Amino acid sequence: MVIEVLLSLIISILAGIIGSLVGIGGGVIISPFLSHLNYSPSQISSTSLISVFFTSLSSSFYYFRKKLISNKTGLIISLSSIPGTFLGVVISNLFSLVEFKFYFAFILILTSLYLIIKSKLVKNNGLKPTEYYISNNKNNIRYLKLFVLVFLSFFAGIISSCFGIGGGIIFVPSLIILYNFTMNNAAATSQFALLFTSLSGLIIYIYYGHPNYFMGFILAIGSLLGGSIGSKISSRINSDSLQKIFSIVLVIVSIKLLYDVFYLN
């Protein structure tokens, strides 16, 4: 029991650091860990969202003080994602643990591919990526981009509550591709949006009594520490190298999940 608690604390700190650095929460690390402990799919998703929420909370404080968050954009994507979280909770209850591992492995592979190619998507044109990109495009293009962003954010909400990973794997590349956000601003705005996305999904899970509250408490402590550390070192670390290493780790984890699905069941 003591070893499990210490391991959970260490993993949640690492998840908080990495999640804060790349703007994807920490659920892509926490969820496989809980899966390894044989939690049910709904327990995995709900308990992992506790970690995502506290990672976002701690890192958002720092990013807000540094004025890296686009508040208007963050509210748009968070409000668009919240309806999707309701659907995600319903879907998560339809999975067996084996099915959950299979689909989650697929999500991890997509996440790793995103991290590998993300640096090629960043196009910093020297402008400050705040409300400029939302409000100063030509009308037709602006509304089209806004529609795409809202749709993708809704889908991110489904993924967030279904797998307990937050929606950062959708938020970050969407902001980079559609609105030319820099990586730092996209990650910061994503963390801000994840506050509301993860909380909405978590509230629904709490209503149905799914989270493991003791594990959630341990993960919350680690995520607060990790999120704070990650946000503070974000400007001093070679994020491209970190993301490539992290993507390799995700591939390894996905292979382990697929091995469990096809050879241990």
Image (spheres, helix red, strand yellow):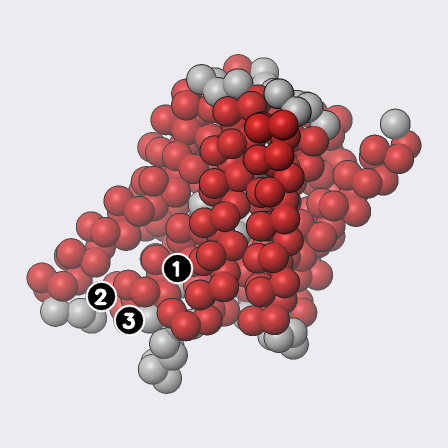
Depicted 245 relative to depicted 207: above or below:
below
Give the labeled residue for mark 1. Answer: 173
Give the labeled residue for mark 3. Answer: 132
* Left or right: 26 as drawn, with respect to 76: right
Neighbour class for label 3 at 10 Å: few (<14), some, many (≥20)? few
Neighbour class for label 2 at 10 Å: few (<14), some, many (≥20)? few
Residue situated furthest front in the rendering: 263
| N-term-proximal mark, 1 vs 2 | 2
Residue in the image at 26% along x and 44% along y: 151
Q: Nearer the viewer, mark 1 or mark 2?
A: 1
Residue in the image at 89% along x and 35% along y: 3
Quadrant for the N terminus in the image: top right
Residue 86 quadrant:
top left
Q: Nearer the viewer, mark 3 or mark 1?
A: 1
Q: Are marks 3 and 2 in contact (CB under 8 Å)?
A: yes
Q: Where in the figure is residue 212, as x and y percent of width and height? A: 68, 23
Quadrant for the C terminus in the image: top right
Residue 206 quadrant:
top right
**Which element is circle 2 on?**
helix
Depicted 143 relative to depicted 265: above or below:
below
Q: Where in the figure is residue 139, as x and y percent of width and height? A: 10, 64
Give the labeled residue for mark 2. Answer: 135
